[in-house]
Image: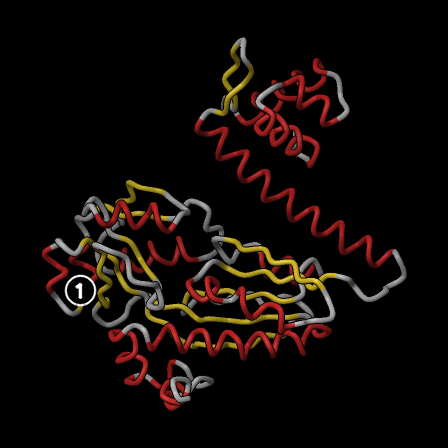
């Protein structure tokens, strides 16, 4: 048995309504049909997704994970259906500009720039924790523009028919730790010195970074011990603040009370910041590139540690020269 969209929609409907009967009504099916489908899915997966009770059903922990991923898959399917429907309508100009982006600090400041990217059309923005889904969606035509981070040294497969521009060729990644951590007194920290620490990681990152991070740690002589999983930056930082774990942060991350960011000696973890687009979206992509450049340079300027690294490593950002950092603050 292969899971199909109908199974995923059933899982999402049951999780959102908390009731087999209500889910059946939403799906225009009978209650026995939904119950039977759910039993078959659970048997196929070998796990229990829901706990039944007289008051309804509730997700198990693994059920919550499955429901979240089912919702993400269905969103991709719906995006693709929208694109195909537009093509069948005769190739008329699409009313939406679809922008996909991987979560990063720059996105928190992008909202005020969206209105200038394509004033003549509506913008649809989707944000993913990882970079795994964005390139395929671009290749399929379900997205027009994509903004992602790729691990340095990772041979990214370029989607067919998609153009790309590397904004930052090498962005170092910092380690975040409690301000009370003994290592916080150092200006740089060896990755190997973190071998005995617990880590916080993102369970929703479907891109290449999780494997890359573990590969680099193995090169430093250890396997990272991940005890905490969270896709929410605030929750992750609250765990780091207590000293229970450390985590990897982008150098443009905004300050967090009780958390300090430190460079890793030799910058063993780094990523490329990449903008991609379909040819017909090139004018909008170039305007987005300019907006992201201004936002990014402002974030660099707000972090003294990263600003110093930036000026000392001009080859890491050939498209954004060090001089631009000073000029961005003029006026």
Displayed quadrant of residue 119: bottom right
Find the residue positioned furthest to the right: 90
Residue 52, compared with residue 306, is above or below; it is above
Residue 223, compared with residue 33, is above or below; it is below
Find the residue positioned furthest to the front: 331
In the image, taking residue 164 as reference, residue 37 lies left or right, namely right
Q: Residues within 10 Å of mark 1 (few under 14, many from 20)?
A: some
Residue 171, compared with residue 179, is above or below; it is below
Residue 61, compared with residue 278, is above or below; it is above
Q: Secondary structure at mark 1?
A: strand
> Residue at coordinates 70% horizontally, 74% vertically from top-left?
279
Compare residues 56 and 39 and report the one nearer the observer: 56
Percent coordinates x, y for residue 150 in the rendering: 46, 65
Colouring used for the render:
secondary structure
Displayed quadrant of residue 183: bottom left
Find the residue positioned furthest to the top: 54
Quarter of the image that includes the C terminus: bottom left
> Residue at coordinates 27% horizontally, 49% vertically from top-left?
224
Residue carrying label 1: 189
> Residue at coordinates 38% horizontally, 91% vertically from top-left?
323
- Count of numbered circles in the view: 1
Percent coordinates x, y for residue 200 in the rendering: 30, 47
Quarter of the image that includes the N terminus: top right
Percent coordinates x, y for residue 154 in the rendering: 44, 66
Compare residues 53 and 155 and report the one nearer the observer: 53
In the image, taking residue 225 as reference, residue 274 lies left or right, namely right
Percent coordinates x, y for residue 121 in the rendering: 73, 66
């Amino acid at each position: 048995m292969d899971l199909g969209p109908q199974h995923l929609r059933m899982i999402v409907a049951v999780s959102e309504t908390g009731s087999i009967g209500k889910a059946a009504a939403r799906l225009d099916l009978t209650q026995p049909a939904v119950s039977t489908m759910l039993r078959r899915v659970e048997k196929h997966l070998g796990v229990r997704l829901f706990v039944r009770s007289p008051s309804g059903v509730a997700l198990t922990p693994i059920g919550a994970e499955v429901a979240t991923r089912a919702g993400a898959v269905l969103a991709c399917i719906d995006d693709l259906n929208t694109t195909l429907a537009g093509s069948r309508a005769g190739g008329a100009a699409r009313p939406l500009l679809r922008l996909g982006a991987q979560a990063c600090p720059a996105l928190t400041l992008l909202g005020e720039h969206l209105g200038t990217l394509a004033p003549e059309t509506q913008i649809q923005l989707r944000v993913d924790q990882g970079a795994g889904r964005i390139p395929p969606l671009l290749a399929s035509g379900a997205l027009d523009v994509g903004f992602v981070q790729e691990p340095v040294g990772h041979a990214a497969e370029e989607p067919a028919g998609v153009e790309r521009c590397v904004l930052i060729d090498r962005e170092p990644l910092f380690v975040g730790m409690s301000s009370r951590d003994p290592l916080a007194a150092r200006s740089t920290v060896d990755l190997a010195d973190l071998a005995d620490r617990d880590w916080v990681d993102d369970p929703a990152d479907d891109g290449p970074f999780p494997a890359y991070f573990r590969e680099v740690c193995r090169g430093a002589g250890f396997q990272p011990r991940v005890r905490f999983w969270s896709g929410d930056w605030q929750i992750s930082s609250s765990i780091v603040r207590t000293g229970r774990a450390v985590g990897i942060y982008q150098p443009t991350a905004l300050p967090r009370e009780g958390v300090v960011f430190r460079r890793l000696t030799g910058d063993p973890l780094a990523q490329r910041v990449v903008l991609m687009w379909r040819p017909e979206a090139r004018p909008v992509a170039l305007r987005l590139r300019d907006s992201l450049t201004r936002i990014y340079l402002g974030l660099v300027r707000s972090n003294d540690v990263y600003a110093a690294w930036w000026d000392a490593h001009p080859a890491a950002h050939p498209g954004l020269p060090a001089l631009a950092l000073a000029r961005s603050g003029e006026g």
